[in-house]
Image: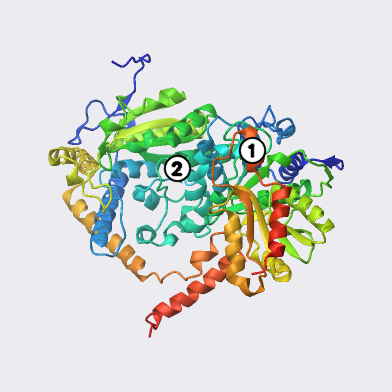
Amino acid sequence: MSNDAITLLEAINLAMARAMEDDPDVVLLGEDIGTNGGVFRATAGLKDRFGERRVIDTPLAETMIAGLAVGMATQGIRPVAEIQFMGFIFPAFEHLVAHAARMRHRTRSRLSCPMVLRAPFGGGIHAPEHHSESTEALLAHIPGLRVVVPSSPARAYGLLLAAIRSDDPVIFLEPKRIYRASKTLIEDNGEALPLDSCFTLREGTDITLISWGAMVSETLAAADALAEEGISCEVIDVACLNPMDHATLLASVSKTGRCVIVHEAPHHGGLGAEIAATLSEQILTRLQAPPRRVTGHDTVMPYYRNEMLYLPDTDDIIIAVRETMEYAG
Amino acid sequence: MHDISYQGEIRFTRYLDAEGKPVGDMPDWGCGDSPWVDYYQQMVLARQFDTKAISLQRTGQLGTYASLLGAEALDVVSAKLMQAEDVLVPYYRNHAMQMIRGMPISQLFLYWGGDERGSAAAEMRRDLPNAVPIATQCLHACGVATALKLRGQHQAVLTMIGDGGTSKGDFLEAINVAGAWQLPVVFIINNNQWAISVPRSKQCIAPTLAQKALGAGIRGEQVDGNDAVALHEVIGQALERARAGKGPTLVEALSYRLSDHTTADDATRYRPSEELKEAWKREPVARLRNWLHQQGLWDEAREQAWQAETKQLIETAVEAYQAMPPQSVDELYNHLYAECPPGLAEQREQTRLKQARMQQGGQDHE
């Protein structure tokens, strides 16, 4: 529809509209997504355009939303369900882990579960408690789920289209801090992006910076600043957290010999650990310094007054990069 | 002590007493040999299957198994009343339903024998596989029903849950949304009085479980789960209402779990033997047989012939089950995603090597 510059949030709306236009089996459901257009307006205008049969306001029950989506998906409908905030996704877990993730597997492909569960996640918008966490590692740990995180309007459009068209269940986590952070010109051409590939956003030779979601913006800003110091950073947006494209990460760090992994989620058991372990297992002799993690800490996400203290920022990344560059073994 | 502001009644339906004698006038449709002889034969088959499954488990030829003993009428009548294009969303005690819906008996053994291919049979069409977590199936049934409605298909979805499961949020969320959206779902509570070791009386203070329907604004009623005739009427009407777009029904079938919870359970630890003995006097198979005898629709000769025939059917299925070649290692990896991702493909290769190593007698540690 639009050839104007649009935000990440508008790109999500555009992708859903495109998917619904292309495929009558695509149906949206969630709390407040119809008349209200979603609390962030991700579904604004879609009920008017596609009708309340396909843009369904549900009763207020997250377990139910996930369970409905599973049941619909087994019959070939492609539900795109919204959980209003990731902090409220936990009642949905049983359906994701025990059913969505393994429907294809346990029926040996007789049935599948092509559903998408969208949820805004992450901090930085001064929201009330339970509205700012990043628990993607819990989801990425589950075999059978795809976990996808966009970090720009273009990737939001292309990855959400891919998620909806995927025959697998996809958890689509939207970094709400950058919902409206920037605008990009997007051609609504229906082209999806791959779900099995990282995105190399900036090429460099000295060190690889690995991130996803809202932290990609901080990471790119750090790379800009470090370039002025003469440090050439390669920046990779992982984007697809499970299954993860290890090949691109391994190739980049093999080339640079150093890496810093940046995520908002807590340090312990975070996906940064998974990436660092993979690098150590596979290319230890290519590493010129230990993989370094810049992450949230292992405490509860603070209420909004202190959230910026908790969230990794550009300076945290710059400091970690400098120390990694200076590492002498 | 408890204020009850709702003063309505929950209908309870029973046609045959414990001995198979009519408790009052039989309905017009209640006479004649159809469908009762067929129901009875399937109930005998279900019980034979159950007996065989337990004996296979006891001799190490089957994994932990959840018996359906006492639920034969409920399972058989429900499945027989369903149309092929209706969808079954089962829990883990619906073996007879699955059999009648077309699942080969050997596949049932395969499922309980620890092989995922047991849920793969093409004969199952769009029916869901067993729900093992409690009550989740009720929400899936609502999702399936939503899909049917979206596509304008006038079919029903049938799902079953135990009495314990009605304490879980999923059940309440499901009947709520089924009411709000008038979904074509029949929810059947197999109230067999025991949730493993916890008796019905400790699950909920409400005198019936069917009345939970009232809070969701849907129709709720009780039926004697040991009475095939009553089940035929109540479940048949519920399915017809669903197909006709008249919304969901919650049916509480009063039955009794004549078995342990599963073969891994020992009900003598918590259940009075006297109670079990009493329950056997009400069981569904003998009840229907007695009634058929009274009607002149069944006799000892037919009984013996059918017992022998079903025994043979089951034995043939056991042979097919035991003759199934093992799954390929690749099956552990190939069905997780639509396409196997590279990292998983590497793990698949590792397991191929591990299998080869195991077949050669294990790693040489010397």
- Of residues B289 and A30, the one nearer the viewer is A30
Q: Position of residue A276 (x, y in %)?
A: 60, 62
Nearer to the camera, A291 or B110: A291
Most foreground residue, B358 or A310: A310
Quadrant housing residue A11: top right
Amino acid type, label 1: Glu
Is residue B340 positioned above or below B96 on the image? below
Q: Compared to B140, does B103 lie above or below?
A: below
Element on which disc 2 rests: helix
Is residue A161 visible in the rendered image? The answer is no
- Amino acid on which the number 2 mark rests in the picture: Gln
Which chain does the numbered disc 1 sit on? A
- Name the residue carrying label 2: B137
Q: Chain of mark 2?
A: B
Position of residue A127 measured from the top left corner of the image (x, y, whole percent): 64, 32
Tell me the SS state at disc 1.
helix
Q: Which residue is mark 1?
A: A307
Q: Residue at x 64, y 51 (%)?
A: A263
The residue lying at 72 percent from left, 66 percent from top is A252
Q: Quadrant of the C terminus of chain B?
A: bottom left
Residue in view at x 74 percent, y 55 percent: A193
The disc placed on residue A175 is none
Side of A301 where A55 appears, left or right: right
A47 and A159: which one is in front? A159
The residue sitting at the left extreme is B274
Distance (Cα) linking label 2 and label 1: 40 Å
Task: State which quadrant residue A293 falls in.
Answer: bottom right
> Does residue A326 appear anywhere in the picture?
yes
Horizontal side, residue A6 vs residue B41: left or right: right
